[in-house]
């Protein structure tokens, strides 16, 4: 039995604040005129576009933003497992999708925090909920069009599935997360050490399939391009 825990009022207010701040500030200045103004979303979209057109998805293109280091481009550095997702998005107009992408990241961040509040073994303190949703680093990442909120929601979802005993679904989610962020392979590794075999094995299988899929689509060179990027 799921016990709904507090503080849901605080969560609702903080989530509404995050969405409002994102809508009011993060969507301003998105344009293709006068230079690239799509932020990191431009790099992700360009990576997918490049994969679809058979060129290096880890190179710089017209919509790739500049990096902090002068003279460097902020190219996509996500592993090849994410390329099919970005490739599918590249069929949509970059500028038209940018607001939806940014607002979607804000919504996914709120959904991830909701999962943590709902399935936490002890009540989550109000200040922690507020901090998780309104800390400047969160809003800045969303404003930049990064995909970290999406990955956080996937992580929170996998954790919630494990909390409810849905090991197979949790393993699929963890595997997808590991494919997107290989350094998180420690999660299924720790599960194996703890003797929690089923989600760990499912995660390993799903991560392997997702990681090898780009080779079947674009060939092995895509991995060399990623490492070189």
Image (spheres, rainbow, N blue to C red):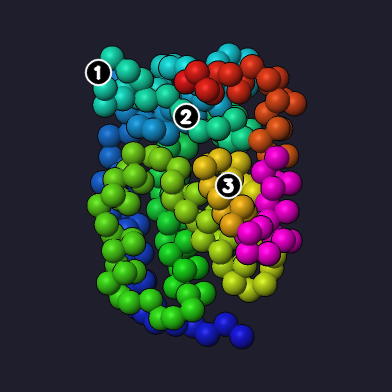
Give residue 10's mark.
none
Camera-near label (3 vs 1) is 3
Q: Which residue is mark 2?
A: 77
Residue 221 sits in which quadrant? top right
| Secondary structure under the numbered disc 3 in the rendered image | helix
When the figure is inspected, residue 167 is found, relative to residue 41, above or below; the finding is below
Q: Is residue 68 left or right of residue 225?
A: left
Q: Are marks 2 and 3 in contact (CB under 8 Å)?
A: no
Of labels 1 and 2, earlier in sequence is 1
Looking at the picture, how far across and down is residue 195, in whole percent? 68, 64
Judge by depth and name the residue closer to the eye, 51 or 173. 173
When the figure is inspected, residue 91 is found, relative to residue 6, above or below; the finding is above
Of labels 2 and 3, earlier in sequence is 2
- Magenta residues span 191-208
Q: Which residue is mark 1?
A: 70
Residue 163 sits in which quadrant? bottom right
Residue 51 sits in which quadrant? top right
Looking at the picture, how far across and down is residue 101, in whole percent? 45, 43
Q: Main secondary structure of the magenta part?
A: helix
Binning the other alpha carbons within 10 Å of mark 3 as few (below 14), some (14 to 19) or many (20 upward) gives some
Q: Alpha carbon of mark 3 to alpha carbon of mark 1: how far? A: 33 Å
Residue 60 magenta-highlighted: no
Give residue 185's mark.
3
When the figure is inspected, residue 211 is found, relative to residue 72, above or below; the finding is below
Judge by depth and name the residue closer to the eye, 165 or 60. 165
Q: Are marks 1 and 2 in contact (CB under 8 Å)?
A: no
């Amino acid at each position: 039995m799921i016990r709904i825990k507090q503080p849901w009022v605080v969560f609702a207010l903080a989530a509404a604040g995050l969405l409002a701040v994102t809508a009011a500030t993060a969507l301003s200045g998105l344009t293709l005129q006068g230079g690239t103004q799509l932020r990191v979303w431009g790099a992700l979209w360009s990576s997918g576009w490049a994969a679809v057109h058979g060129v290096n998805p880890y190179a710089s293109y017209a919509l790739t933003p500049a990096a902090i280091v002068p003279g460097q481009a902020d190219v996509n550095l996500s592993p090849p497992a994410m390329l099919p997702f970005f490739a599918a998005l590249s069929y949509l107009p970059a500028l038209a999708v940018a607001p939806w992408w940014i607002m979607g990241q804000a919504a996914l961040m709120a959904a991830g925090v909701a999962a943590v509040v709902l399935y936490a073994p002890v009540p989550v303190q109000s200040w922690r909920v507020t901090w998780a949703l309104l800390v400047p680093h969160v809003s800045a990442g969303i404003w930049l069009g990064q995909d970290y909120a999406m990955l956080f929601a996937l992580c929170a979802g996998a954790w919630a599935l494990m909390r409810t005993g849905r090991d197979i679904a949790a393993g699929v989610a963890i595997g997808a997360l590991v494919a997107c962020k290989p350094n998180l392979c420690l999660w299924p590794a720790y599960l194996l050490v703890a003797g929690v075999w089923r989600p760990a094995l499912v995660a390993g299988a799903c991560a392997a399939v997702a990681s090898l899929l780009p080779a079947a689509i674009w060939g092995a060179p895509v991995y060399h391009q990623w490492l070189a990027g």
